Image (cartoon, rainbow, N blue to C red):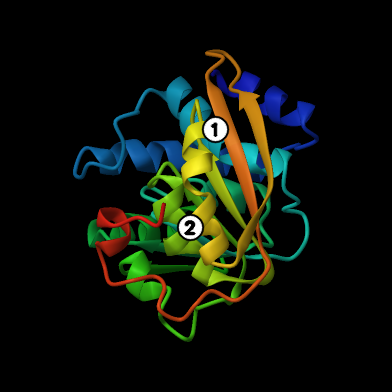
Amino acid sequence: MKEDVFYHSLKEYGIELTDEQVNQFNVYYETLVEWNQKMNLTAITDREEVYLKHFFDSITAAFYYDFTKPLSICDVGAGAGFPSIPLKIVFPHLKVTIVDSLKKRMTFLNHLADQLGLSDVAFYHDRAETFAQNKKFRESFDLVTARAVARTSVLSELCLPLVKVGGSFVMMKGANFSEEMEKGNLSIKTMGGEWDKVHQLFLPVENSERNIAIVQKKRKSPKKYPRKPGTPNKEPIE
């Protein structure tokens, strides 16, 4: 995806970038590629592919969820900052918290935030399981996001305990989501969530399928969840 196609495609969804935002995405790309030579942040380094598969793909959540309102967001397992940093660039008012278990990624993200001039961003080096048991953060976020982290039955246990009652959980998924969705039903209900809607879309240029799955938090999550680190993945609630 060439940069002009990136801007035009966003404009079709009512998102117009300022010169500053255009520059921030350029700095993001340059910083990502530079740091990727020192640490494994992404297998995708071609400029056009980064703009499509990382930047545009991250922003697709905003086509189906309202990010224009004041929101506190927690991005679980964000890796090199996806989807929360592209969303933060487009919607600067967002309050963003990123949790990731690899310390070197935290170093990169702190540097990136400085380079992009971002405020109201916080980074925590922690396992999602222990972070969600922290009283300071548990059930405190308007929105929790996760992109390509784990299957739904696992993700819901890691993420829904962080969502405040009345808030939302947005999963960004690839193709053939229906079977995974079905297997995740029990876990979502156990954590106090209810399916809202799953939106299917196809990325421009390559026409690959994506699914934006939105879950509403209706009830408090039982205190015993998430279980100790590693358990949700080994023994998913299905």
- 179 above or below 114? above
Counting residues from the start of the chain, the first of labels 2 and 1 encountered is 1
Query: Residue at the location (29% across, 31% down)?
Result: 43
Q: Which mark is residue 178?
A: 1
Which residue lies most toward the left here? 38
User: Which class describes the residues within 10 Å of circle 2: few (<14), some (14-19), or many (20+)?
Assistant: many
Given the image, on which type of amino acid does mark 2 rest? Ser
In what element is the residue under mark 1? helix
Left or right of residue 104, residue 113 in this image? right
Write down the residue under mark 2: 187
Q: Indicate the position of residue 163 as horizontal and vertical percent values.
A: 58, 68
- Quarter location, residue 99: bottom left
Left or right of residue 120, residue 112 in this image? left
Q: Indicate the position of residue 115 as horizontal and vertical percent values.
A: 45, 54
Towards the viewer: 1 or 29 = 1
- 90 above or below 52? below
User: Which class describes the residues within 10 Å of circle 1: few (<14), some (14-19), or many (20+)?
Assistant: few
